[in-house]
Image: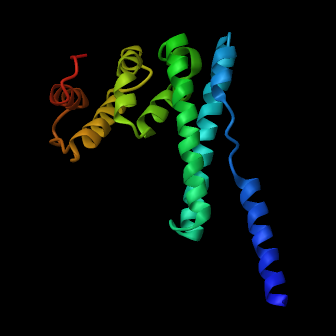
Amino acid sequence: MKSLYTSSIILLVVFIVSCTQKVPVFNVIEKVEQSTSLGDLKVTLDTILQRHTNTRALSTKYARENGRKSSLFREAENQVYLTDENNIAAIKLLFEKYGYPDSLSVGKQRALIPWIVVRNYYQVHTKEQLQSYLVEGLKKGSISNYDYYLYLKDIYSLKLKKEFIPDESWSDSMKIQILNDTLSYSPI
């Protein structure tokens, strides 16, 4: 009887701790829809990054402390999935409303947030749908050639199921051109 009581208390504590440590999933899409100023855009980008970072940190923590087969890790990974879905929808709407954020307006770090969200997203089709916006970000100087190269490299790996291994002497521009050609994308 004492063992059952102790087990129940432990389960209750684990449940309470796991509930309080979850990153709340709220609809950041509403933040984008309601934004009317540059200040709103900055706050929205900060919120997206915070959610993106927090869910991944929690998942990593549970993987390290409890293992990848634990229920806490699985719940955290579900949280990452839900957050990514919400964030990518917000980024799409943000792109439609504002285009790719200009680093001169929102700051260099904030201008990378859409790239981070798109790069970490798992669906190739969605990544490809957003390519024109990333090209816009590249042309504005909001993302670098290297950033754009990494985005293309991810798509290449996901689509072709193999790693793109460039020659060390190739510039980022050359890597982009080769990947664009290989993936049959329009030249930049």
Location of residue 60 with respect to 94 vertically, above or below: below
**Which sits in the foreground, 83 or 119?**
83
**Which sits in the foreground, 70 or 116?**
70
- Rendered residue at 57%/61% (across/down): 73
Location of residue 179 with respect to 120 vertically, above or below: above
Quadrant (top left/top right/bottom left/bottom right) for the C terminus: top left
Image quadrant where residue 41 sits: top right
Q: Position of residue 46 (x, y in %)?
A: 63, 30
By what rule are the colours in the image chosen?
rainbow
Q: Position of residue 95 (x, y in %)?
A: 50, 17
Image quadrant where residue 133 sits: top left
Q: Position of residue 56 (x, y in %)?
A: 56, 49
Location of residue 158 with respect to 143 vertically, above or below: below
Please state if 13 lies on the left or on the right of 55 as rendered. right
- Rendered residue at 61%/54% (across/down): 58
Image quadrant where residue 24 sits: top right
- Rendered residue at 21%/17% (across/down): 187
Please state if 171 lies on the left or on the right of 32 as rendered. left
- Rendered residue at 37%/20% (across/down): 138
Please state if 126 lies on the left or on the right of 172 as rendered. right
Number of residue marks:
0
Quadrant (top left/top right/bottom left/bottom right) for the N terminus: bottom right
Please state if 38 lies on the left or on the right of 6 as rendered. left
Considering every residue shown, the one lying at the far front of the view is 1
